[in-house]
Image (cartoon, rainbow, N blue to C red):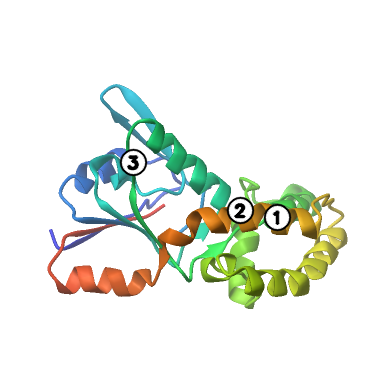
Amino acid sequence: MACVVIVGTQWGDEGKGKVVDYYAGKADVVVRFSGGNNAGHTVVVKGKKYAFHLMPCGALRGKQLIIGNGVVVDPKVLLEEMEMLKKDGITPKLMISERAHVIFPYHRALDEAEEQFKGKRRAGTTKRGIGPCYEDKAGRFGLRMCDLIDREIFKEKIEHLFPLKERQIQIYGGKFDFTKEQLLQEYNAYGEKLKGYVCDANLELNNAIDSGKKVLFEGT
């Protein structure tokens, strides 16, 4: 095993969690490289069930974990999963790419508004803001983890972006009750808790591969 990639080739729920957990036992590094908290990988260890939406499954095996730049991160969900592990005495060895994009409340509001707007042609999304966050990434509007952990840059970008997102939601006929001040307060707190995990994950991953470590790429 040098690098192994596990992906689903259907519509999800193929049982990837069990397969990923098996291969994680053989790996040195486990990398989540795509998707967001719309995914759900379930692993059972010693009779206890763990459902991961963002955290790579290798967390239960003490492996080095990387959330790559292709993932869209809901910091609230990630922190909840970290807390769940800590309650069981597990401290995940986690790195988060500084270039991973961040899901905000306006992404979730847009997701719901777009679905309602499409009517019968709606995609049936999880309404967790995944698609709108990727739209921002492609459109160069997105905020990344490196922005989230820098309060000045984060505030400057939110000041510029927030009116645009409010307008987009209104156009689709949606509602958004979150204020800019609420968003800044909540996400500054998330950034403070996560800043110690944010790094140049690409460099760390390439170094791991170059040094001959076994790397498992966990897809959605």
Which residue is labeled 2 in the image?
Answer: 189
The amino acid at mark 1 is: Gln
Residue 62: which quarter of the image?
top left
Residue picked out by circle 3: 17
The picture quadrant where one finds residue 183 is: bottom right
Earlier-in-chain disc, 1 versus 3:
3
Q: In the rendered structure, which amino acid carries the disc numbered 3?
A: Gly
Please give the count of numbered marks on the rendered protein. Answer: 3
Visible in this render: residue 47?
A: yes
Image position of 124 with respect to 140: above or below: above
- Real-space Cα distance between discs 1 and 2? 6 Å
The residue drawn where x is 87% and y is 59% is: 170
Tell me, yes or no, whether the two marked residues, 3 and 2, touch with CB atoms within 8 Å: no
Q: Are marks 1 and 3 in contact (CB under 8 Å)?
A: no
Residue 61's spot in the image, x, y percent? 24, 42
Residue type at the position of mark 2: Ala
Q: Give the side of residue 10 with respect to residue 121, left or right.
A: left
Q: Are marks 1 and 2 in contact (CB under 8 Å)?
A: yes
Q: Nearer the viewer, residue 6 or 143?
A: 143
Q: Residues within 10 Å of mark 3 (few under 14, many from 20)?
A: many
Q: CA distance from mark 3 to mark 2?
A: 31 Å
Whether residue 29 is situated above or below residue 153 in the rendered picture: above
* Vertical relation: 149 (above or below) 75: below
Estimate the x, y position of residue 130 in percent, counting from the top left.
59, 56
What label sits on residue 185 in the rendered view? 1
Front residue of this view, candidates 191 and 42: 191
Locate residue 6 relative to residue 102 in the image: left or right: left
Residue 7, horizontal then vertical, whole percent: 34, 54
